[in-house]
Amino acid sequence: MTTIGIVAFDDVEELDFAGPWEVFGMARKLRDQGDRLLLLAEREAPIRCAKLMRVLPDLTFAQAPKLDVLLVPGGVGTRREVKNEAMTDFLRRAGAQASWVTSVCTGSLLLHEAGFARGKRVTTHWTFIEQLRDRGEVTVLENERYVVDGNLVTAAGVSAGIDMALWLTGQIWGEEFARKVQKQIEYFPRPPYT
Amino acid sequence: MTTIGIVAFDDVEELDFAGPWEVFGMARKLRDQGDRLLLLAEREAPIRCAKLMRVLPDLTFAQAPKLDVLLVPGGVGTRREVKNEAMTDFLRRAGAQASWVTSVCTGSLLLHEAGFARGKRVTTHWTFIEQLRDRGEVTVLENERYVVDGNLVTAAGVSAGIDMALWLTGQIWGEEFARKVQKQIEYFPRPPYT
């Protein structure tokens, strides 16, 4: 049984978490092994996302079980959350126990604040490359969909979380299984204006 | 000002609606013209999605304004909703007034029930091609990310909704603008296991 926790906060970017949620949710369904996929927030209240969708957390930080995978999405709310000690404390605690510590988009800024990105190679949304570099003690790569450094996996902006979550699915449960998930969500993308 | 309504129901597939939501939400933000992006459901209660995420509708069907774009996602809940007259009635009413009638995944079955797919070329999730054909009076295409027939646009499964929403963004506001949206959500996909 695998437990995956995705962190949520006001002004989190929708696809940052909904993309990986879909990948891991399909993996859970196909595996049928009682895996847990949880949306975790500081409080029980509904989350108002960056593009105004409202979602309900499954558990608060205080209620969260030990996680195998911690995923931190980004969004404009990270500007506030990077100064929120309740967030940083939770990430530090949950990440220290997790097999994989991951982020999408500007979620990497929160992981840096919590100490996980120090001395590591990471990436983030293309508009935040310099800001993450300016935080120091980190090597920020550009033009990568996701960057793996040990058990730290950081994805580029928004939609890159889907690629990262599929890669991680393959690492945890095997590439053949990841391809099954990919087929179920028909992830054979063809952007229309290239 | 453009009004986009995305329909939600219990057991709707998360990425079916969250992908287009991200695309249109980013378009709204970049345009800054007071566009409305609404999650619409039969009732006010939280929606429990197919992969167990819970989301809150913005408005009920009864409260919905006239839509410029109607988007119907899929998911296992469509098996129930195809027999729900409140759903069919709303789709018929909203779609008749809309400039674009669209679906993702098995949302096309609901559009067929509401009459929009009759005599048209459409697509759906790859596992539902035959079931949609069996409904009759419809030409179901395979291996297409989305199929356009007049103002009816039907996408393949789950992640195909992102491609479709970006295409539609280009049709409504121009290709150059659609590329800006694409860049902001870093939609330059690279599936890891090909």
Image (cartoon, coloured by chain):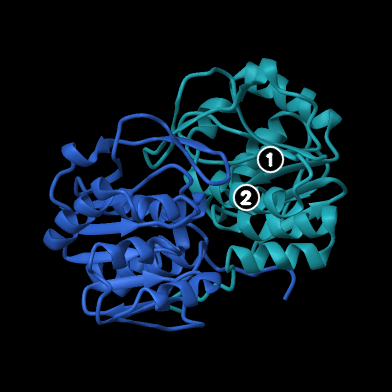
Chain colours: A cyan, B blue
Identify the residue shown where x is 32% and y is 55%: B27
For label 1, the crowd category at 10 Å Cα-Cα, with few meaning under 14, some 14 to 19 and many 20 or more, is many
Give, as a three-letter code, the residue at label 2. Pro
Label 2, on which residue?
A20
User: Residue A92: image x %, image y %?
Assistant: 77, 25
Q: Please tell me which residue lies in front, B19 or A105.
A: B19
Left or right of B177, for residue A7? right
> Does residue A89 appear anywhere in the picture?
yes
Secondary structure beneath dot 2 equals helix
Q: From what the image shows, is residue A183 above or below residue B70?
A: below
Left or right of A111, for residue A83? left
Label annotation for residue A34? none
User: Residue B4: image x %, image y %?
Assistant: 25, 53
Q: Which chain carries label 2?
A: A
Q: Earlier in the sequence, mark 2 or mark 1?
A: 2
Identify the residue shown where x is 34% and y is 57%: B72
User: Residue A120: image x %, image y %?
Assistant: 81, 46
Label 1, on which residue?
A71
Q: From what the image shows, is residue A57 above or below residue B87?
A: above
